[in-house]
Image (spheres, grey):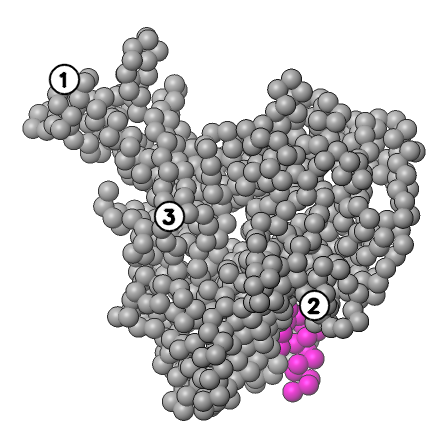
Amino acid sequence: MAKFGLSQSLRRVEDPRLLLGHGRYTDDVQVEGAARGHVLRSPHAHARIVSLDATAARAMPGVLAVITGEELRAAGIGEVPCVIPLKNSDGTPRADTPRLPLATGTVRHVGDPVAFIVAETAQAARDAAEAVEVEYDILPAVTDLAVAHEDGQPQVWDSAPRNTCFDWEAGDAAKAEELVKQAAHVTRLTVVNNRVVVASMEGRACAAEYDGATGQFTVHAGTQGSWLVKGLLANAVLKVPPEKVRVVTPDVGGGFGMKLYLYAEYALCAIAARQVGRPVKWAAERTEAFLSDTHGRDNITLGELALDKDGRFLALRTRNHANMGAYLSTFAPFIPTGAGTKVLASVYDFQAIHARVLGIMTHTVPVDAYRGAGRPESNYLVERLIDQAARELGMDRIELRRRNMVAQARMPYVTAIGQRYDSGDFPRVMDAALAKADWAGFPARQAESARRGRKRGIGLAYYLEATGGGPTENAKVVFAEDGMVDVYVGTQSTGQGHETAYAMLTSHELGVPLDKIRIRQGDSDTLPEGGGTGGARSLYSEGQAILVTTASVIEKGKEAAAELLEAAKVDIEFAGGRFGVVGTDRGMGILEVAARQRARVAAGEDTLLLDALETAKIDAHTFPNGCHVAEVEVDPETGHVAIPRYIVVDDVGHALNPLIVRGQVHGGVAQGIGQAMMERTAYDPESGQLLSASFMDYALPRAEDLPEIEVDLIEVPCETNPLGVKGAGEAGAVGSPPAVVNALVDALGGARIDMPATPEMVWKAVNAA
């Protein structure tokens, strides 16, 4: 394969199927004889369960079972685990928050599952839930991250004094301290990264079956990787051999990190299916999703940027209070620590960095990875700090960035936090963005806005992402009986366009027409392992797995073609989907070779199929980066903010399909703008009730709220994978919040503003100024 030969803007092959309504999502899965499950949830943020009586509910028509937490404990059901074994800075382990699929003894947030009702119909299950009698002793609750760690606040867990479940640090504290003392100037800024509700278009759902004769569980669920859910469900909760659990993920309508995990409802459906002897199905309603899906972000971070007399960066220090919610979710402790801190250096040259992260428990929905998973939070802090430093020093904010950017000539470059950047041309990308945005022409546009009574600002944010994921990935290629080539992958599309990208890559390698390739995903029985989708890992990880697997197919094909063409294997060449004998016109297409071999095996011959399954080692991750420029216009009378212009120039390495890349950037920018300006997750401080528990109260951006998003790509190929690609799925959500807020601060003359910058907050800032 030519190293960087793929870059066609091909329309997504999966779109006709999905747009015509032929997609098959979890709630579309029809399992014969399925009963319906319903979760009874706590109405209180913090309470002791005094008693729970399900007698009346169990006697109601159509009710098959009412399962409680105490019954799960008695049956030996295990806990839904957090898989991150984080150590505190003093070497002690983080606090633990043990959680059965149903609460026992104490509930710790509104929506905490208390009982699972199984009935013939969903309505019968809901009716029975109302008949379950639960007596609660209501306890004080704390939902505010800013005060939760203070003395005297209600405790979420006795094992986490002052509600601090971990106190973690990274970097060189002593060197950073010394550089801060020596600095000519230190800029200090505290920023809020507001909690967001993920609100995927498709809600979570599950359908579970149990075969009593074999002890086999089959769970259909919308996940971001069946294998993780399978492993946690089998090993931690059900405590059965992993081969006794099969997880099948159909089409998924959006994930954004939230669908990575094993949730209580998936375990409850499996447990109930075994108990009642019938399949059990559950699907979340939208308010239920607000109360049970993991939330994202929710950090308060103090940053200190130390500079010398020439405006060069010396050190960066951060202290981050990260809200974990009521329980430690699957990956939660890793998000603000290992994930977030590795990009603190961004594209800049620091002599030292030190980060301290406190994980804080509150009586709220658990928080975990959300598009970008820690990296947007870190980039937001750094870019806000740089603008603030420029303002304090009276320097041009572009010049301050340019002076401190790592030059391409220094690649590979190891940052002060220990990350090795293999490639990047940061000044070139920034200059391209400035030119495309006509940064120099902004004063004229600002003056025109002023004539209409509007305040106009321009903001820039340079971001750097670090992709994540497992150290291996698998792929399998099977030449099917119907003449199609099935490619089984260990990742999971949740709307990104994987079917198109993987089919393009397979077609390029094997020379098989695109319409002869099917991408198969989501069934844990089809591959020994799969790393799933998260951390923008899919193309560079699965792409490498497809490369090694198709190479294996070609080697097998050469051996088979040599026998069929009566030639030595060394004389067989492969090009354009055809095996040929060197120096002759004798040859055979790969699909014909595969069909001939299948026929021979079917006839009982001991011969070689072209099918292959291979594992790729993922030795290094990637560092996509780019520059966002936003312009905002503020109506000072109402606080309304419009975004008339939005420019992105991205380096995602080799863009396999630029059309898909741009679509991913558009989606990420939309989510970032939503967080920056609209999305406010509000809890009542007294009762702990989630006040923004529906789309009546939680504002997602609509089409009219979003600008035209112009995206250019500058390809600086990644040096650590043969495709030259860098993860693109999360990039838009990383750069957009600081670009929008920096523009807003510029429009308001440097006024303090936090996310979400709602019209009310902006109006107050205008009047305060």
**Do tag 1 and tag 3 residues touch (Cβ < 8 Å)?**
no
Q: Say whether residue 761 is magenta.
A: yes
Residue placed most toward the observer, 421 or 157: 157
Residue range (magenta): 753-769
Residue placed most toward the observer, 19 or 102: 102
Q: Which residue is mark 3?
A: 618
Rounded to the nearest angstrom, the CA distance separating label 1 from label 3 is 38 Å
| Residue count near mark 3 (Cα–Cα under 10 Å), binned few <14, some 14–19, many ≥20 | some
Q: Position of residue 369 (x, y in %)?
A: 57, 55
Tell me if residue 671 comes above or below residue 490 in the rendering.
Answer: below
Is label 1 in a helix, a strand or a loop?
Answer: loop
Query: Which mark, by number, is residue 566?
Result: 1
Tell me the quarter of the picture where residue 551 sits.
Answer: top left
What amino acid is found at the position of numbered circle 3 in the picture? Answer: Ile
| Residue count near mark 2 (Cα–Cα under 10 Å), binned few <14, some 14–19, many ≥20 | many
The N terminus is located in which quarter? top left
Q: Position of residue 143 (x, y in %)?
A: 75, 64
Q: Nearer the viewer, mark 1 or mark 2?
A: 2
Point out the tag, 1 or 3, that comes first from the N-terminus: 1
Q: What number of labels is visible?
A: 3
Residue depicted at 72% across the width and 59% down the height: 159
Q: Position of residue 190 (x, y in %)?
A: 60, 77
Is label 3 in a helix, a strand or a loop?
Answer: loop
Tell me the quarter of the picture where residue 88 sits.
Answer: bottom right
Residue depicted at 45% across the width and 84% down the height: 179
Q: Is residue 603 left or right of residue 101?
A: left
